[in-house]
Image (cartoon, rainbow, N blue to C red):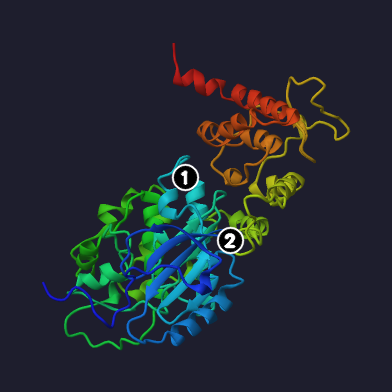
Amino acid sequence: MGQGYSLTTLSAGAAGIDVPELADLTYEKSLGTARFMKTIRARHKDGLVVVKVVMKPFNMQLDEYVSGLLHERKLLADVPNALPYHRILETSTNGFLIRQYMHSSLYDRMSTRPFLENIEKKWLAFQLLCAVRDCHARNIYHGDIKTENILVTSWNWLYLSDFSSSFKPTYLPEDNPADFSFFFDTSGRRTCYLAPERFLSTGSQVDTSTKVNWAMDMFSVGCVIAELFLETPIFSLSQLFKYRSEEYDPFMTHLQKIEDVDIREMVSHMIKLDPNQRYSADECLNFWRNRAFPDYFFSFLHQYMYSMTDPSAGRGPVTAGAENLGEADDRIDKVYNDFDKITYFLGYPDDQDNQTPPNSKFTLRGNLFPLHIDIPNYRHQANSAHHTVDDGTLIFLTACELLLAFAERVTDEAKLDRILPYLTVLLTDKTDLVRVSALRALTQVVSILIGFVGQANPE
């Protein structure tokens, strides 16, 4: 059997957070079963955090790694879709990496209702490419991009997290899968996102001090995007070895099932066996603009959603549960006031014939039917005649009036999965005005769904 561990290899062991330097954190539970670094969820007075802990063998010093991680954190501070470690700490016995806890990784989100629509998958793939492009522009390479290391908020803002190129090995022996399991297979799924050139055959002469490069990261990105659209990984460790020896073709077994031709073509370029044939993240974004990704992702949506997200989520102070600093209300007000701009960039057609003069007033005490949408520069009678398309509308669903306005533009499935549940919850609100607004919007959304219900229950 051989020795089960090495004294010179860092280990998670029975590491904990009971040290004076982390007195402001309270242990909650252990996350996962990784052997390299133990992952703990802890509670801070401002919210939940993730703590990665490693035990130091003997008197090993981690100064070099701490310095590299601090430099990395500084460079990533202004990257919209990156979430570096917030605290990097070394004690006499342990090393600690601490970042904000988020409830959903991309791996979790893919299997959580409401399931992702095609446009949302493209939006997440676009953000991932933006994150990798911005990191590579700063000479920061991730080294372990996979669905578990990509975090997704409830409004589908994506963060690339858990950067590890500074302390995980670049190359692994092909004939010893134990190293892969120890450093990279933290979930135990045997899914492999690593580039094939990172595995060395017996007798290979490679400078082991070589760091991860952009082509290695891009292969991992291609694997993640393929899994996002297929909802199944395209490589296990054994399949990657076969692909490396040209005995396995993921295009025939998986990629041809991706319905979007442009996405399929883009992923095929990312996972080329020859790293010199792969496109960089910037080249992918430029080449597939207006093809795989709508133009408004580039010209409007990414910048607008970032202005909505930063700094109150992801990298700024987290609002404690007992407080309400009004971030959500501010966001709703911003979308409400910017609605005409949003509809313009998303390509909504003008409804001049259905527009109501701005001086018309709709009040909850007046005539409720037919219902009207009362949004600045978008006042009109609500109806189901609008053409529903799979566009960026799903990214903006908020508040009763906005929910009603956007309901005209989304599919029936989206109305059922994304809009009605929110309105139903608001029916139990303690404020009368909120309940009336929710009932008003709910009535109109249900009326738009009549055709859908009729098809589902034919007599």
Query: What kind of element bears circle 2?
Result: loop
Above or below, 53 against 384 in this view is below
Residue 292 visible within the image: no
In the rendered image, residue 381, in percent from the top left (x then y), is placed at 74, 27
Examine the rendering and report whether any part of residue 178 can be seen. yes
Of residues 21 and 307, which is closer to you in this image?
Answer: 21
- Looking at the image, residue 454 lies above or below residue 82: above
Location of residue 429 in the rendering, given as x and y in whole percent from the top left corner: 67, 31
Q: Where is residue 405? Give x, y as percent.
A: 68, 35
Q: Amino acid at mark 1?
A: Leu
Percent coordinates x, y for residue 18 in the rendering: 45, 68
| Residue where numbered disc 2 is placed | 314
Tell which of 146 and 391 is nearer to you.
146
Q: Earlier in the sequence, mark 2 or mark 1?
A: 1
At 48% from the left and 69% from the top, the residue drawn is 281
Q: Residue placed farthest to the top in the image?
A: 459
Depth check: give the residue in front, 394 or 357. 394
Label 2 amino acid?
A: Gly
**Residue at image coords 47%, 45%:** 116
Residue 279 against residue 91 in the figure, above or below: above
Q: Vertically, is 215 above or below 409?
A: below
Disc number at residue 116? 1
Q: Is residue 440 left or right of residue 273?
A: right
| Total numbered labels placed on residues in the image | 2
